[in-house]
Amino acid sequence: MPQKYAPPGQLWLLPQSQQENLDLDRRQVIAVVEQAYRALRDGGSDNPVKTIIDGPDHRSLSYSMVARDAGSGTVCFKAVHEFDPRRTEDAYSFHSFVFLVDDTTGAPIALMDVVKLGPLRSSATTALFARAACPDARTALVVGTGVQGQAALPMLVAAMPDLERLQVFGTYPEGLRAVQDSVEGREVEIVTDLRKAAGEADIVIGAAGLSAREEVRRDWMKPGAVAVLLGYGVHADVCHGADYRIATDTAQMQATCDDLRGEDGTPPSVDAQLPDILLGLAPARRRPEDVVFAYNSGMAVTDAALGRYIADLALAAGRGDKVDFW
């Protein structure tokens, strides 16, 4: 029987406060996100390229996305607005939401804040990249201590429990402590020499914000390592100098990778896409010694699948507010 999210004429609201302390299982989050990617190839899902508005003065950044996750029968409409994304005016703000609809019944599911949802699906995607490209990894380094940096290592450990050494590089003491506290029962080492740490890491995760002061360079990385970029902290020369490049989606990467374009303005080529890698249709690397660059661009199909998962957990917990809307 279909879930009853809200009566006709009402909309179920799930603000961030109502999503806290849900009984989330990170391994299940990874499984939900993985299935969403797989369904893009063999399950009837769809994920058009996002629409982006970035003014010439870079004062704000706005984008919207729509997707259908066939596995859960969920359509997702997502909108994002960032003010002062380059942190030049000390006035940064971020507002975003997803509107979920049950595509099997036509009934609205919820309007959700994505402060929690976004980092969950991004860190799960990073873990999928890392596990595919470097399954025998023992050392992981995350660059950045914001929301994305704090989410990266716990999800990576859930996907790769045999990791032995976890490291973080950042400049904000509170953020560094938060990353250290993020992985229960595991030690996270704070590193101050980024070059040395990057040279020892099997997995490098660039999760810093636009204000990142240092970035990992290509010649710092050891053979066989993988660098996953979902923000900043990994220099463009890693992308251009990599032996193999993978992405969540080539078209999405070309729409969002302005910082990685070559001198002639062309985007970097992509050797394989994550859905094909997960389905065994393309390799995550050619040779064991390859340095692999992975571009993690958010895809709304994972917001749809994971949003439905979180919504069902919230419904079971009696969370959210129903308001007259239509």
Image (cartoon, grey):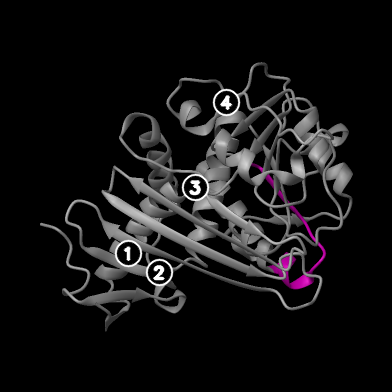
Residue 154 shows in this picture = yes
Judged from the image, the secondary structure of the residue bearing numbered disc 2 is strand
Sequence-wise, the earlier of marks 2 and 3 is 2
Across and down, in percent, residue 23 comes to 37, 64
Can you say whether 186 is above or below 19 in the image? above
Q: Is residue 30 left or right of residue 152?
A: left
Q: Which is more foreground, mark 1 or mark 3?
A: 3
Q: Label 2 amino acid?
A: Met
Q: Label 4 amino acid?
A: Ala
Judged from the image, the secondary structure of the residue bearing numbered disc 4 is strand
Residue 299 disc label: 3
Q: Are marks 3 and 4 in contact (CB under 8 Å)?
A: no
Can you say whether 129 is above or below 167 in the image? above
Can you say whether 194 is above or below 319 in the image? above
Q: Label 3 amino acid?
A: Met
* Cα–Cα span, label 1 and label 4: 32 Å
Q: Which residues are magenta?
A: 163-177
Q: Which residue is mark 1?
A: 311
Q: Label 1 amino acid?
A: Ala
Q: Which residue is mark 2?
A: 112
